[in-house]
Image (cartoon, rainbow, N blue to C red):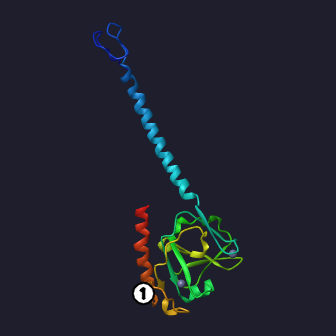
Amino acid sequence: MSTLIYPRSQNVEGFPTGKSPGKLPRAQQRAEPDAQTAALRLLFARRLARALCIWKKSVAELICSCPCGKARVPVSGRPFARFICHCTICQSVYRAPFADATILWRNALHLKRAENIQFKKYRNPPALSRGTCVSCGSPVVALLPALGLAFIPAPRYPQSLELPAPAMHIFYHSRAADVPDNLPKYSGYWPSELAVTRLVMRTAFRRQADA
Ligand SMILES: [Zn+2]
Ligand SMILES: [Zn+2]
């Protein structure tokens, strides 16, 4: 490795004129370690950011639970849409005139710890896999893996959480009773399915872009 020699006359910081030459100026001495340090800091910052991101994804922000409290669905993130479903399966599973359901991404759910949930499909694919509490039988979550979507009944969220307002009624043709509100009402299988699909397209990506 060669050493740079500066002429005696050159006034180099830290090495006044007249003193023995032979060393790099202080600024240049530091240049190489500084670049290394900066690179290491950058690497560290990236790893930290990635670790924080993974940590944020893996930590549930809230718990959705059934009325008896045994079936629990830890969730990170928020639902992006909500609708009222009057289909006969919902009426049967919810034991109510209709289902008030929210939509969120499947990967927002941490179902590893949701032991007390029994899943069942009520129709042929691509049917929802509907999860109910093994103890009280209440619906807690429904999954649609093909589209990466999950549905959680609105009453399962903590009361303090602000949910999106219901956007529409679907399967309104099989309603148990008329609902006197101004929301759009879709009757028939395909109009209802299409309406929910459009609702997902309209809200899921908009909310992601906003976040
Ligand atoms: Zn339904
Ligand atoms: Zn329960």
Residue 183 location (% of width, % of height): 45, 83
Kind of residue indicated by mark 1: Pro
Can I make out residue 141 in this image?
A: no
Point out residue 119 in the picture as x, y percentages from the top left corner.
Answer: 62, 77
Quadrant assignment for the N terminus: top left
Q: Residue at x 33, y 17 (%)?
A: 4
Quarter of the image that includes the C terminus = bottom left
Residue at figure coordinates x 60%, y 70% from the top left? 159
User: Quadrant location of residue 62?
Assistant: bottom right
Measured along the vertical axis of the image, is residue 111 above or below residue 142? above
* Residue 81 image offset from top left, x and y in percent: 48, 73
* Residue 164, percent from left and from top: 49, 72
Query: Front-most of 33 and 202?
Result: 202
| Residue 102 sits above or below residue 61 on the image | below
Helix, strand or loop for disc 1? helix
Is residue 11 left or right of 59 when viewed as pictured?
left
Q: Nearer the viewer, residue 2 or 31?
A: 31
Question: Does residue 169 appear in this view?
Answer: yes
- Give the residue at x 35% y 17%: 13
What residue would you read off at disc 1?
A: 191
